[in-house]
Amino acid sequence: MIEYRIVPAAAVLIAVVSLGGCSGDDGGDYCKHHSEVHADHIESVASLNLMASGDGELSGEMTIPRAALTALEASDIDALLADAGNFFTVQSDSECLISVAASNALSDPIAAMFEAHCGADNKLGRIDITLFDRLADLDELEASVTTTATAKHFAISRQCDAPIFRLE
């Protein structure tokens, strides 16, 4: 099991758990020098933009390139987009209400807007990115996480044991 953790000051923790297909090595030069090749394959990278307010509210957008969906039928893509749990889950003191606010299965990349209502008194422990578990053909995800205290921008690749922070 591989776990990535990014800890913004507002106590939102990002974790990616159980990346199937990861080789277990550090990816060598690819991971160390990823900034040199990132722009060359950006069209094949999924993206997650996540905004966390200080009052237990999360909102964001997930985009997924069509190339990562080749093994799925149209109905499977619709089902993927219908459940935000296919993108991420929230670990917190009490349950969060997570929903997909809007989605577009016909675009390239496909897109889904989501929101999570966790409550102002609900301490968020972490957010697990589950998309890699759902899409075997997805190799990389670029994430932007913004809280009231900080902002992080990084990529997660199946080929690397750690998040990649230098993308340009």
Image (tube, rainbow, N blue to C red):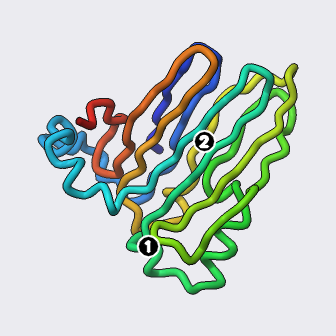
Which is nearer the eye, 14 or 154? 154
Q: Which residue is mark 1?
A: 66
Q: Residue at x 37, y 41 (%)?
A: 155
- The image quarter containing residue 106 is bottom right
3D distance between C-alphas at marks 1 and 2: 23 Å
Badge 1 element: helix
Q: Position of residue 143 (x, y in %)?
A: 46, 41
Q: Is residue 72 above or below residue 45?
A: below
Disc on res. 25: none
Which is nearer the eye, 81 or 22? 81
Q: Which residue is mark 2?
A: 128
Instruction: Say which amino acid is labelled 1.
Output: Arg
- The image quarter containing residue 92 is top right
Q: Residue at x 28, y 50 (%)?
A: 159
Q: Residue at x 87, y 20 (%)?
A: 121
Q: Position of residue 33 (x, y in %)?
A: 15, 38
Q: Is residue 111 above or below residue 143?
A: below
Q: Position of residue 96 (x, y in %)?
A: 83, 39
Please indicate whether residue 69 sits to the left or right of residue 147 in the image.
left
